[in-house]
Image (tube, grey):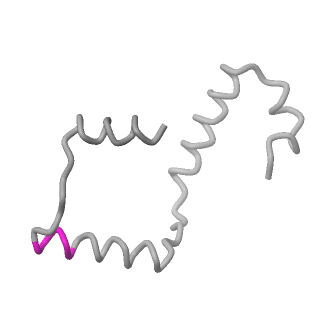
């Protein structure tokens, strides 16, 4: 669904849209329904956890991470 399909949303101010999103997010977060996680994501998490347990992680400092991100822009 797109916001353009709901005319009332497109007529809201930016502040009203933010409040609407906050309320919608709160409503979603209280629902008991689980959102299924794809098997590929679970496998990737398992792989990363195994590497962590084996000590095969390469961690970056915040500065290194910021440098990598800046290079990609």
Instruction: Identify which residue, 43 or 20, lies in the foreground.
Output: 43
Please tell me whether residue 9 is drawn above or below residue 65 in the rendered image.
Answer: above
Q: Quadrant of residue 53?
A: bottom left
Query: In x, y percent, where is residue 4?
Result: 86, 40
Q: Is residue 36 left or right of residue 65?
A: right
Please tell me whether residue 42 is drawn above or below residue 18 in the rendered image.
Answer: below
* Magenta stretch prevailing secondary structure: helix
Residue 69 part of the magenta segment: no
Instruction: Identify which residue, 5 or 28, lies in the foreground.
Output: 5
Q: Which residue is at the far left?
A: 55
Instruction: Identify which residue, 50 or 12, lies in the foreground.
Output: 50
Q: Which residue is at the far front?
A: 71
Q: Is residue 29 left or right of residue 57?
A: right
- In the image, which residues are magenta? 50-54
Please tell me whether residue 57 is drawn above or below residue 21 in the rendered image.
Answer: below
Query: In x, y percent, where is residue 45?
Result: 33, 71
Query: In x, y percent, where is residue 20?
Result: 67, 32
* Residue shown at the point (29%, 41%) measured from the top left: 65
Query: In x, y percent, where is residue 66?
Result: 32, 36
Q: Is residue 39 left or right of residue 52?
A: right
* Residue shown at the point (30%, 76%) measured from the top left: 46
């Amino acid at each position: 669904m797109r916001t353009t399909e709901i005319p009332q949303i497109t007529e809201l101010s930016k502040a009203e849209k933010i409040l609407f999103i906050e309320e919608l997010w709160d409503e979603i977060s209280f629902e008991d329904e689980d959102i299924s996680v794809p098997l590929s994501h679970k496998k990737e998490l398992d792989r990363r956890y195994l590497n962590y347990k084996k000590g095969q992680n390469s961690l970056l400092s915040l500065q290194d991470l910021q440098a990598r991100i800046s290079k990609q822009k």
